[in-house]
Each structure stands twice: as C-alpha cells, then as structure tokens.
Amino acid sequence: MILVLLGPPGVGKGTQGEMLAEDLGWHRLATGDVLRAARREGTRLGREAQRYMDRGDLVPDEIIVGMVRERLERLESGGGVILDGFPRTVPQAEALDEVLGELGSGVDGVLELTAPDEVLVKRISGRRSCAECGKLYNTYFDPPEVDGRCDACGSSLTHRDDDDAETVAHRLDVYRAQTEPLVDFYRGTAAELIRVDGDRSMSDVQGAIRSALQQRLGVDGDGQ
Ligand code: AMP
C-alpha cells in the first residue's frame, strides 16, 4: 500500500503521517526530514538543498527523485508506505510512477489535507521543536509551560529557518503553483483521491483519516 500525503505547509502532514505510520506499523518517508538531516550532517545533498530550502523554494526534481528512489529501493517489502512531502511537482509524480512500476507497485491512495491560509500561517510561524528530544510545540495553540523551553527535557526550543513569515507566504505560493496541480494529476490515475479537512483537532483529523482509509482503501487497524 502506497499512500501519498498531500497538503500545504502547516496543514499537519508530518504530525498526521507520524501518527498513522506508528498506529499502522507502516514506513514513513518524509523528504523534508531527510533533507534537514542531510543539512545537519553537512553531506553533499544537504549542501545542495540548503539554498532552495532557505528561500522556501523546491529543491530540483532530479535531486529529490534520486534521493527517494534510493530509499524506496531499500525498503523491505510488505506493509504500507506513507510518502510525506513527495511528490511535490507533476514531474516528481511521473518519476514516482516509474520507480514504483519498476518495483511492481503503484500509488494506491492520495490523502489531501486542507486548511485555510490564515490557519496555516499561524501553525507554521508558531511552530517550535525541542533540539534535544524532538517534541513539537506551537506558540499559539500548544505553548510550552516555560517560554522557549521543552516541558519534557528542559532543553531550548528551536524554530525552523524556513518558518519565518515571509518564507511561509512564499512556500504557500509555491504549493499553489507547483504542488496543488497534483490533485488533478492523480484524478486521472487509478489512485483513490481522499480529501480530509485538516482544520480540526489533531485527534479529529486522525479519526477522519482512519475512517476514510477504512472505507475507501479497506485499511483496517492492523494496517492491512
Ligand atoms: P517540508 O518539511 O516537507 O515542509 O519541506 C521543507 C523544504 O524541503 C521544502 O520547502 C523544500 O525546500 C524541500 N523539499 C521537501 N520535499 C521536497 C520535494 N518533494 N521536492 C522539492 N523540495 C522538497
């Protein structure tokens, strides 16, 4: 089962994708996370991606496709795969079909999460994470008890460089121009297109996702 998570920055793809992967025992491949790890480690991939990410632009398709291909080929067979943040352009979606075709599979479902722009901007600009344990916060919706400090381990909270207000507005424009057309792309394929309103509590969104996956793709609690 290959499930593509689609949606603008800040809609909750990361959070929902992680919950889903954990509950169903599926793999999750989040290209943004892979790129940020590569930057921290100072690899060639990280250095190449840096200037695009800092501007809020997309990293070129050929870099991303090579990176995803390598990871998909390494995944053990069986179970599901959640693709979070990939594909983000029509050429990436075409390349994904090609890679999956070679591996004898294809995209089964596309889950599109939606929310109004003003909600997205608050969610992203308020986003903080613990540098030490990774716990996530939001200064508007889910602030830590002590400003700038992690409730769980007391370490300082960090803000993603590309989460400042100007870059966020640009990332939303990039999403509308380059990624949203994927909805039409997938409408013309065999993949099941599922739209879920992401402007609700975390657990309500997860509940809606789980029931949609059950009804439309027959995915049960054990991930099968
Ligand atoms: P994300 O964590 O998914 O919001 O991604 C953060 C940044 O990583 C994006 O703004 C892009 O610069 C880059 N990125 C992540 N995934 C892709 C992708 N599939 N194609 C191009 N750039 C990407």
Image (cartoon, rainbow, N blue to C red):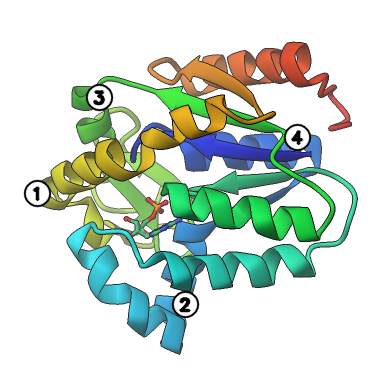
* N-terminal-most mark, 4 or 1: 4
**Label 1 belongs to which residue?**
166
Name the residue rendered at 28%, 65% in the picture. Answer: 53
**Amino acid carrying mark 4 in the image:** Asp
Q: Would residue 133 be seen by someone viewing this image from the given angle?
A: no
Q: Give 125 or 67, whichever is nearer the viewer.
A: 67
Residue at mark 3 to residue at mark 1: CA–CA distance:
15 Å
**Amino acid carrying mark 1 in the image:** Glu
**Amino acid carrying mark 2 in the image:** Ala
**Label 3 belongs to which residue?**
119
**Label 4 belongs to which residue?**
23
Q: Locate ligand 1 by image quadrant.
A: bottom left
Question: Which residue is outermost to the left?
Answer: 166
Q: Is residue 67 left or right of residue 162?
A: right
Label 3 SS: helix
Residue at mark 2 to residue at mark 4: CA–CA distance:
27 Å
Residue at mark 3 to residue at mark 2: CA–CA distance:
29 Å
- Mark 3 Cα-neighbour bin, 10 Å: few <14, some 14–19, many ≥20: few
Give the numbered dot on residue 30.
Answer: none
Residue at mark 3 to residue at mark 4: CA–CA distance:
27 Å
* N-terminal-most mark, 3 or 2: 2
Residue at mark 2 to residue at mark 1: CA–CA distance:
24 Å
* N-terminal-most mark, 2 or 4: 4
Q: Is mark 3 within 8 Å of ligand 1?
A: no
- Mark 1 Cα-neighbour bin, 10 Å: few <14, some 14–19, many ≥20: few
Name the residue rendered at 89%, 31% in the picture. Answer: 224
Q: Give 37 or 96, whichever is nearer the viewer.
A: 96
Where is residue 132 drawn, in percent x and y? 46, 65
Name the residue rendered at 15%, 42% in the picture. Answer: 169
Q: Give 79 or 58, whichever is nearer the viewer.
A: 58
Give the numbered dot on residue 38.
Answer: 2
